Every structure is written in structure tokens, then in C-alpha cells.
């Protein structure tokens, strides 16, 4: 379990919680009220918000408090820059939780042994030290703060101490360190790889990220230190070449679909963070070897894109090469990585993949619930954390920079509103007065008020970005959710079952590569039926989720009232191949269910006694929406899953005239209009989205 999500993958996917482009040039005609539509070219450059000068959002106080220094004992294979003259290195406490006084106390990972002053994992870890170094590097470059420069220097020395520099594991990284500086390569609970420096890992990827941005920052300011960082980064790249890119050009067979075999821990998520560092390094004059690694890793990440606005995974880049079913917000910086790599490598095809994720997937994500820990493919884990929200903000900003399409900036502002209240709790998750970001919020709105390193880091990465982009920051402060109309999920095991159909509660909801929603699934034999009672007030796209199994003869027919909507073949999946389990839990998109239908049924027929496993049915409005208010403004996002333009009405808070921007599915601005009306009439382009701001 990682960050509260049951995903059994090789390697550490972020720590488990201790608690719970060019704008379009199309012209449109003038229309009468309620809105006046004008030529796009005439108004496209006018800002949709008026940024205001205010106190910076970034407050490093809590991150500073999490920091420490340690003088580690001599340990074979581990040293760092100027160790003999500067024996103390920068480290960072892993967790922080409230104490009895209302303040916070430092906490390490795993069980604590007071007799030895050790934790079963450790006090400090490479995952957080690397990312904290990036916070300080970006803050230093943005503000010139010498304190942030010094903190980045100290932490980069600490990170490189964790790196193994000799032997067969050279270039890899030990994950955990005890309070006295002793390394703990085999922690409890166990992480893979074990020992933690015995293979490629998330912490190796994040070390490359930190060293790449560190080299770029220090190259001219401190050439000697930068040269050291370059040497250590090249050592890590050698490890990736040896352990990952040795399979470049090989592919895995995942339930009949080909996926790249050359990703770090088989993850586009981990690999993306290495790409961020490699892009910074190559931009700063890094080696030709680094450039080759960057191109090959980027190619692998881009290969995991799929679907469109109507079909799973809805245009996103999937994070795990071994599953066709899984997406999660945490670590989802794949679009950011590809957008930055596209600029570094001059490869617009990478930016196109990032744009599809940003302009197709993110509008659906925002209107259907936000940056969940697990879309598996239903909302198997609707809890949300700063790592997920920040990953999407960073990706949208990078996409905007690479494509010059301001629609991504609008979406970034709406996504960043998560930190200020647009989340399941309806409360701010970041406090500018203290610099604390809470550790997460459950799907039913319960906040975990711990404030550990990871949450603090990713909250601050977003705040640094907002301070540099005041237009996005202004949007982010409009953060009270007034309305969200998006995907509704009906669990099959909770429906009315008849004939040869039964509710199944498996011993584990985890299938081996995905997660059943609710308590399980409905198993439907030949002649069995599942009946859902629905009352749609608008047309809905029908997307049932089946556990497809190779060779199955089961065919399930869906009817809306008495009209046949479509059929699903349970055997429409390839052989297991390299997948962790046979079959795949996948959404299958069927035609639209019209307004006024009250009965939705699924009846299975089979020729050889096979059964269908129906997990759930997702009902997707043709036009979904998220409406926010606050800070004297209103913001609305409307997303269209139809292949035809759709008209809609949306009520918006705020004063004055509303600005309406319509974007197609590739993020191109196709129309701008204005309306003084309280309830605004909009047209949402086919498989596109519309942004409204008052």
C-alpha cells in the first residue's frame, strides 16, 4: 500500500501515510445577448483575470524546521563533496505530526526503538531529501535567496552521500538513514529493491531529478560544486543505462497490448522524474550520453498514452507499464516531463502527448472528482494528497510553456485551487502563514493534519510556481466548490440481481494489476441480469467496467428501458503475457443513454458456461462541469464528452461581465465571448472544454 492506495508494484511509490500553443485564428460572428462573441484574434491576448500584488505564497518555515544536519560515521562506498572539511551534511525529517502543545514533532519512518534511537526504516530518506533540494533550488533561482542556496547545497551533499559510488551497485542510492547518519539499506517494512541500492528505484529517479536541476543552478555560480554534481549525475545515468536502458527497444505484452520494457521500475511516473532532471542537465550542457538517455526514456513514457475523451484512459499517460487499468495522481508528472523534454530535444511529438493528457484528461479529471490517489479505473481510492495535486499543476504549466496554449494555464489555476479549498474537505490544505501543507484528505472530507516532508515539498513547489505566475495564482484563490457534475459510478454488486447473477466479495479487491470498486463485483452467468434504477436529467455516456478475461464466451447486453444500447464481450482481451494477472479490469464505452430512462439492465449470455464479471457502470454526462467561487470571483469549467458541440447554461458567482473561452480537444482557443448575465449560456466544443471567469 502506497499513499493509501492498494497498488502492489515493484519499488516504492511514495510513502504510505502513517495515518490514515498557438491560439486558433478562427473568426466567429457577433451574437445578441446574453453573450457577445468577438473575433478570437482581437481578444485572445487579454488576460482572463487581473492578478494583484500580494505577499508571496511561498513560506519555507516548516520545510526549514524539518531540516537537520548530521555527521555520519564512515561507511564504505559513501562520501560526498568536501567530506573531510565539511563533515556535516544536510538531511530532512520524514514526517511531522501535531503534539500535545499544538505544535509539531519530528517523526521517522516505521517503528521507533528508544533504546537505540532508531526507526525500523529511518529518520531521513532520499525521496524527500532530493525533492526538498529542488524546492530550495527553485526558490533560490526565483528569488535570489542565499538561505535557499545554502539549504540546496547542504541537501545535495546529503543526497550524494546516500548514493553508492563503488562496486556493482555504483550510481544507485540507499533510501533510508538513521538519526546518527547510519545508512539502513534493508528497512522494515521492506521496500523493493532490497537492499535499496541494489537496483533502479524511485529514489534513483528522484536523485537524477535533483542532481540535474542542481547542476543547472550551480554551473555558473559554483563551478567546482557543479562539476561534482555532474560526475555524480553521470554515475547515476550509467546505472540507468546498465539496469534499465539495456532493454531499450524491447516490449512487454500486457494483456495483448505492447508496452515499453525500458522504464525505471516499469513506471512512467518514476521515469518522468528522472526526465525532469535529465532535461535540466542537457539544457545546461550535459553529456551526449545524458541526451541519449533522455530521448529513450521520453520515448518510453510517451508510449503509455492512450484513449480519448470518450474512451479509457481518456487521453492520459498511464503510470505503470504492467497495467492497462491503473492511473493515479501522485507522481503523475509525465506530461511535465514530456513537455520539457520536447523543448530540450526539439521533438514536438512529445509535446503533443503532453497536450493530449492536459487538454483531454485533465478536464475530465477535474469535473469527475479531482486528483484522486487511484482511478483503478473507477475511483477506487478517492483520497487526495499534495503530491497528486502538484504533479498535475506542474504538468499543466509545463504544457502551457511547451505549446503556447493558455488553456493549460486556466486548467492549472483550477487544479491549484485544491490547495485553497477545492478539495473533498472544502478547506485549505496549505497555510501560507506557516508553510505547512496537510498530509491529505479522504474522499469523504477528513483531513490528515500531519504535515510531513512530502506534502510540505509539493505544496511549496506549487506555491513557487504560483508566485511566478500571478494569473494562475489568482485563479487558484477562487476555490469554493459550488457545483460539480461529473461521472457517477454505480457498483454492480449493489444493483438488483436476478437469474444466474450473484454479488461476489473477493478475499482481496486487488486483482494483481488493478482494484475492484465498492465491495467487489457482480458475477453474471448465462441468463443472469443486473438491473440499475437511474433517473438521468440529461443524456449520459454509458461506460461499464468489466473484468475482461481471455477466451471468455460471455457476452453482456445492455438495455436502457427496452432499447438495446450495446454489447460487451468479456473475452475481448489478449492473453496475459507479461501482465501480473490474467485479464484486465477495463471500462468499455457504449453509446449514449437518453434523458428519461429509468431502467438500465445488463444481461449475459454464454456458450460454454463462462460468466461475466461486472465491476461497475460509469455514467458520464455529455457536458460535465466544475463551478468554483471565492475571492470575489467565479470560475467554471465545462467538459464535453460528445463528438458534437453542446450548449449549456452555467450560473456563476462574482460581479461584472463573464469571459467565456472555448477550447477544442487539442487545447486550441476557438472562441471568446462575454456575458453580463448571472446565468451564462455557453457552447462547449466537441470533445473540448470551455472556461468561464467572472
Image (cartoon, helix red, strand yellow):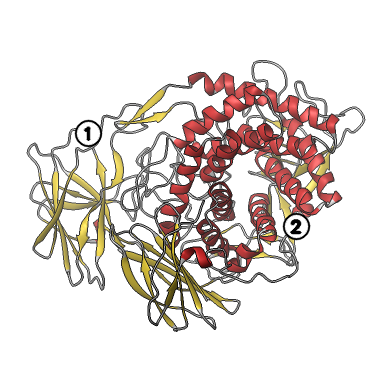
Residue that protrudes farthest toward the right in the picture: 85
Q: Image quarter for residue 559? A: bottom left
Q: Residue at x 38, y 71 (%)?
A: 29
x, y percentage for residue 232? 73, 26
Residue 44 vertical position relative to residue 320 in the rendered view, above or below: below
Inspect this view and state whether residue 66 appears. Answer: no
Nearest to N terminus: mark 1 or mark 2: 2
x, y percentage for residue 614? 23, 50
In the rendered picture of this protein, how many numbered marks are placed on residues?
A: 2
* Residue behind mark 1: 550
Q: Residue at x 63, y 22 (%)?
A: 289
Q: Residues within 10 Å of mark 2 (few under 14, many from 20)?
A: many
Q: Residue at x 45, y 61 (%)?
A: 366
As helix, strand or loop, the secondary structure at mark 2 comes to helix
Q: Image quarter for residue 642? A: bottom left
Q: Is residue 129 left or right of 670 when viewed as pictured?
A: right
Q: Residues within 10 Å of mark 1 (few under 14, many from 20)?
A: some
Residue that protrudes farthest toward the top in the picture: 167
Q: Is residue 570 left or right of 360 when viewed as pictured?
A: left
Query: What number is the disc on residue 62?
Result: 2
Inter-mark Cα distance, 1 to 2: 52 Å
Amino acid at each position: 500500500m502506497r499513499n493509501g492506495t492498494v497498488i502492489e508494484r515493484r519499488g516504492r511509490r511514495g510513502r504510505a501515510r502513517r495515518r490514515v500553443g498557438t491560439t486558433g485564428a478562427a473568426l466567429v460572428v457577433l451574437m445578441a445577448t446574453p453573450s457577445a462573441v468577438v473575433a478570437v484574434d482581437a481578444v485572445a491576448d487579454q488576460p482572463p483575470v487581473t492578478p494583484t500584488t500580494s505577499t508571496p505564497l511561498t513560506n519555507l518555515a516548516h520545510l526549514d524546521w524539518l531540516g537537520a544536519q548530521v555527521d555520519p560515521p564512515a561507511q564504505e562506498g559513501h562520501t560526498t563533496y568536501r567530506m573531510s572539511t565539511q563533515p556535516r551534511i544536510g538531511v530532512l525529517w520524514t514526517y511531522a505530526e501535531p503534539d500535545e502543545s499544538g505544535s509539531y514533532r519530528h517523526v521517522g519512518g516505521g517503528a521507533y526503538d528508544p533504546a537505540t534511537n532508531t526507526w525500523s526504516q529511518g529518520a531521513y530518506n532520499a525521496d524527500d531529501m532530493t525533492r526538498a533540494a529542488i524546492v530550495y533550488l527553485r526558490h533560490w533561482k526565483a528569488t535570489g535567496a542565499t538561505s535557499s542556496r545554502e539549504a540546496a547545497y547542504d541537501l545535495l551533499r546529503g543526497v550524494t552521500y546516500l548514493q553508492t559510488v563503488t562496486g556493482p551497485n555504483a550510481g544507485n542510492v540507499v533510501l533510508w538513514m538513521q538519526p546518527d547518519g547510519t545508512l539502513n539499506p534493508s528497512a522494515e517494512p521492506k521496500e523493493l529493491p532490497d537492499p535499496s541500492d541494489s537496483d533502479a528505484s524511485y529514489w534513483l529517479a528522484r536523485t537524477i531529478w535533483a542532481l540535474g536541476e542542481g547542476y543547472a543552478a550551480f554551473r555558473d555560480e559554483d563551478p567546482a560544486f557543479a562539476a561534482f554534481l555532474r560526475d555524480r549525475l553521470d554515475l547515476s545515468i550509467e546505472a540507468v543505462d546498465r539496469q534499465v536502458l539495456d532493454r531499450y527497444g524491447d516490449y512487454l505484452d500486457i494483456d495483448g497490448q505492447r508496452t515499453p520494457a525500458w522504464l525505471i521500475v516499469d513506471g512512467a511516473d518514476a521515469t518522468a522524474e528522472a526526465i525532469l532532471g535529465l532535461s535540466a542537465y542537457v539544457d545546461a550542457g550535459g553529456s551526449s550520453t545524458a541526451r541519449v538517455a533522455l530521448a529513450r526514456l521520453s520515448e518510453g513514457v510517451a508510449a503509455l498514452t492512450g484513449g480519448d475523451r470518450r474512451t479509457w484512459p481518456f487521453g492520459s499517460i498511464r503510470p505503470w507499464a504492467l497495467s492497462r487499468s491503473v492511473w493515479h495522481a501522485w507522481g503523475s508528472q509525465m506530461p511535465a516531463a514530456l513537455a520539457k523534454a520536447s523543448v530540450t530535444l526539439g521533438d514536438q511529438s512529445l509535446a503533443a502527448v503532453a497536450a493530449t493528457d492536459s487538454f483531454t484528461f485533465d478536464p475530465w479529471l477535474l469535473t469527475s472528482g479531482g486528483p484522486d490517489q487511484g482511478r483503478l479505473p473507477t475511483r477506487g481510492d478517492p483520497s487526495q494528497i499534495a503530491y497528486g495535486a502538484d504533479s498535475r499543476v506542474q504538468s499543466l504549466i509545463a504544457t502551457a510553456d511547451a505549446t503556447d496554449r493558455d488553456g493549460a494555464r486556466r486548467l492549472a489555476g483550477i487544479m491549484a485551487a485544491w490547495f485553497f479549498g477545492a478539495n473533498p474537505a472544502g478547506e485549505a490544505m496549505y497555510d501560507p502563514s506557516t508553510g505547512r501543507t496537510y498530509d491529505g484528505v479522504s474522499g469523504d472530507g477528513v483531513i490528515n493534519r500531519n504535515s510531513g516532508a512530502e506534502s510540505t515539498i509539493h505544496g511549496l513547489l506549487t506555491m513557487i510556481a504560483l508566485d511566478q505566475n500571478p494569473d494562475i495564482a489568482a485563479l487558484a484563490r477562487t476555490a469554493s466548490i459550488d457545483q460539480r457534475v461529473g461521472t457517477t459510478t454505480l457498483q454492480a454488486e449493489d444493483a438488483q440481481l436476478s437469474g444466474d447473477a450473484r454479488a461476489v466479495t473477493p478475499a482481496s479487491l486487488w486483482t494483481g494489476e488493478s482494484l475492484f470498486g465498492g465491495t467487489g463485483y457482480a458475477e453474471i452467468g448465462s441468463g443472469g441480469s443486473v438491473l440499475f434504477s437511474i433517473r438521468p436529467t440529461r443524456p449520459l455516456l454509458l461506460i461499464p467496467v468489466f473484468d475482461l478475461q481471455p477466451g471468455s464466451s460471455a457476452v453482456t447486453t445492455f438495455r436502457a428501458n427496452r432499447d438495446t444500447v450495446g454489447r460487451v464481450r468479456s473475452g475481448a482481451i489478449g492473453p496475459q503475457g507479461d501482465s501480473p494477472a490474467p485479464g484486465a479490469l477495463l471500462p468499455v464505452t457504449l453509446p449514449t443513454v437518453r434523458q428519461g430512462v429509468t431502467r438500465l439492465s445488463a444481461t449475459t449470455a454464454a456458450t460454454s458456461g463462462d460468466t461475466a464479471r461486472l465491476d461497475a457502470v460509469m455514467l458520464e454526462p455529455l457536458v460535465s462541469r466544475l463551478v468554483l467561487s471565492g475571492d470575489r470571483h467565479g470560475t467554471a469549467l465545462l467538459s464535453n464528452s460528445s463528438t458534437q458541440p453542446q450548449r449549456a447554461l452555467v450560473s456563476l458567482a462574482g460581479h461584472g461581465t463573464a469571459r467565456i473561452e472555448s477550447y477544442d480537444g487539442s487545447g486550441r482557443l476557438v472562441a471568446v465571448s462575454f456575458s453580463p448575465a448571472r446565468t451564462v449560456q455557453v457552447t462547449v466544443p466537441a470533445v473540448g472544454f470551455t472556461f468561464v471567469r467572472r
